[in-house]
Image (cartoon, coloured by chain):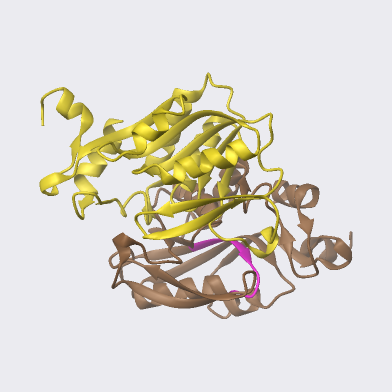
Chain colours: A yellow, B brown
Amino acid sequence: MDELKARILAEGQVISNGVLKVDHFLNHQIDPKLMQKIGQAFADRFKESDITKIITVESSGIAPAVMTGLYLQVPVIFARKKRSLTLSSGGLETEVFSYTKHEKNHVFLADGMLTAKDHVLIIDDFLAKGEAALGLTRLINQAGAYLSGIGIVIEKSFQEGRKKLEELGCPICSLARIASLEHGKVTFLEDIREGTH
Amino acid sequence: MDELKARILAEGQVISNGVLKVDHFLNHQIDPKLMQKIGQAFADRFKESDITKIITVESSGIAPAVMTGLYLQVPVIFARKKRSLTLSSGGLETEVFSYTKHEKNHVFLADGMLTAKDHVLIIDDFLAKGEAALGLTRLINQAGAYLSGIGIVIEKSFQEGRKKLEELGCPICSLARIASLEHGKVTFLEDIREGTH
């Protein structure tokens, strides 16, 4: 998705060889118009997949997931990182390790949010080592639902998440695939293939 | 907003005299189409206010805030409840007590997200005792920005938040105002005024 890649180049900050900060349009400040276009792109990719529900994990996945849900006309659920007063017990639960925050989280889904009849699309903001997306697939499995696809806004293709998700056998759509953050520079996968980097 | 009130009556669960659970369209599962209409309603209310930025706090405020930002054509920032690797130090910070979760949180905003030139609209999912919204006003003050208005999806008018926010002197727009959750029943403020409850 060209506009997204242009925004990453213009506004992304390479913090290290492994970390890209896009706090100006995705992870802290959100550009609603860009999210709308991202939602349209995912909906276009998965419109033939009979999706009944979208799942993401709080918080940065919510904006792209809701825009995708708007175009696919399906509800969005977000797995919670903490139990709240209204989700005090029961439900589905799995452990997810966050490499960005260096901590283990449990993520929770209330009973009844997913059923065995659901065809589920996972949407998330980043794919790095695949921990969050794999956690969501475990919740989908626990509910007996069907994983129809995975939509990722920004994929760090040089980390192992993509390979792990490909082993699931479902379609994966990443709107921007980053081959490298070395030398403080974002290089996209397509640029390498086209020999233009 | 009639559609929102109808959804609260049809799908909301009164957990106690103080707690309403709307996990089916706002706080856990999100109805994107309803969020779009909520965004339109807030944008319509604040379209003359020269808003330059919307602020909310993760996570349930994000969907209505992003839809409002789409219609007002302004960026949305969400205050974070935890520092991340990419927001490791600095920035603005304030303490917010969550009565729902029975805990103190600090909420964080990176430097530069708000400036003294900004006219800011606060959007949040619930107004109860006003802690979250007041925390956001403190961040706005710290940045030297101007508070232009507050948009609340569901207001529990029987708690003290509304009164506290009115003391700020800015316009407040609550799309559904709940007068009481007693006897396991949602009663809206307008219904009492109209004598129809």
Q: Position of residue B57 (x, y in %)?
A: 49, 63
Q: Is residue B126 one of those drawn in magenta?
A: yes
- Residue in the image at 57% along x and 32% along y: A120
| Number of marks present in the image shown | 0
Q: Position of residue B166 (x, y in %)?
A: 59, 76
* Residue B157 higher or lower than A95, as above or below: below
**Quadrant of the snapshot with the C terminus of chain B:** bottom right
Q: Where is residue A167 in the image (x, y as percent from the top left)?
A: 42, 28
Q: Is residue B107 one of those drawn in magenta?
A: no
- Residue in the image at 60% along x and 36% along y: A141
Decide if residue A115 is on the left or right side of residue B70. Answer: right
Task: Choose between A163 and B144: the one closer to the eye.
Answer: A163
- The residue most toward the top is A48
Q: Can residue B50 be seen in this view?
A: no
Q: Where is residue B90 in the image (x, y as percent from the top left)?
A: 28, 73
Q: Can residue B11 be seen in this view?
A: yes
* Residue A140 higher or lower than B121, as above or below: above
- The quadrant in which residue A64 appears is top left
Decide if residue B73 is on the left or right side of residue A24. Answer: right
- Dominant secondary structure (helix, strand or loop) of the stretch shown in magenta: strand
* Residue A192 higher or lower than B74, as above or below: above
- Residue in the image at 31% along x and 64% along y: B87
- Residue in the image at 53% along x and 18% along y: A48
Question: What range of the chain is rendered magenta?
Answer: B122-130
